[in-house]
Image (spheres, rainbow, N blue to C red):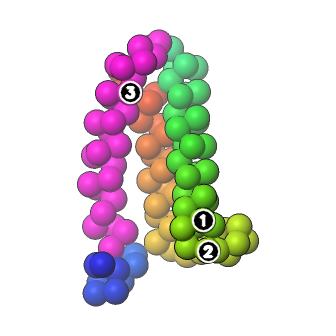
Amino acid sequence: MTAPAIGEIWATLAELPVILAASWVACGWTIARFQVPRSSGARAGMGLLALLFLLFAEMLLGVVGFGRTVEMQLAANLKTGPILGLLAQIAFACFHVVQR
């Protein structure tokens, strides 16, 4: 809703702090819930798995929810707004290693 009013990049920048804060909380809960070992390898594996699930879900939503082809979805992700989102998703994957 805000993207048409303020632009895709500004809308993405406005939502990123909220999404990252929620992701930080969810990450901490998930680590505690599944008793993930404190080792960097276990946490990095969890972060990588979470990132892969997130990217798959985003691709699936684009294809099934918006009727795009895989190629169209990949092309849509090459815009500045989605690139910022991808950087935030990579940060999310790193939360698992950083949270102790």
Q: Nearer the viewer, residue 94 or 28?
A: 28
Q: Which residue is mark 3?
A: 30
Please tell me in which quadrant of the rendered image residue 73 appears.
bottom right
Q: Which mark is residue 67?
A: 2
Residue type marked 3:
Thr
**Secondary structure category for the residue under label 2:** loop
Q: Is residue 16 left or right of residue 36?
A: left
For the record, the magenta segment spans 11-38
Q: Nearer the viewer, mark 3 or mark 1?
A: 1
Q: Residues within 10 Å of mark 2 (few under 14, many from 20)?
A: few
Query: Which residue is under mark 1?
Result: 64
Earlier along the polypeptide chain: callout 2 or callout 3? 3
Picture residue at 58% right of the left edge, 36% below the top: 48
- How far from the left and from the top, in percent, is residue 66? 55, 73
The kind of secondary structure the magenta stretch mainly shows is helix
Looking at the rendered structure, the kind of residue marked 1 is: Val
Q: Position of residue 22 (x, y in %)?
A: 29, 45
Distance between mark 2 and mark 3 Cα atoms:
32 Å
Residue at horizontal 55 percent and vertical 52 percent from the top: 57
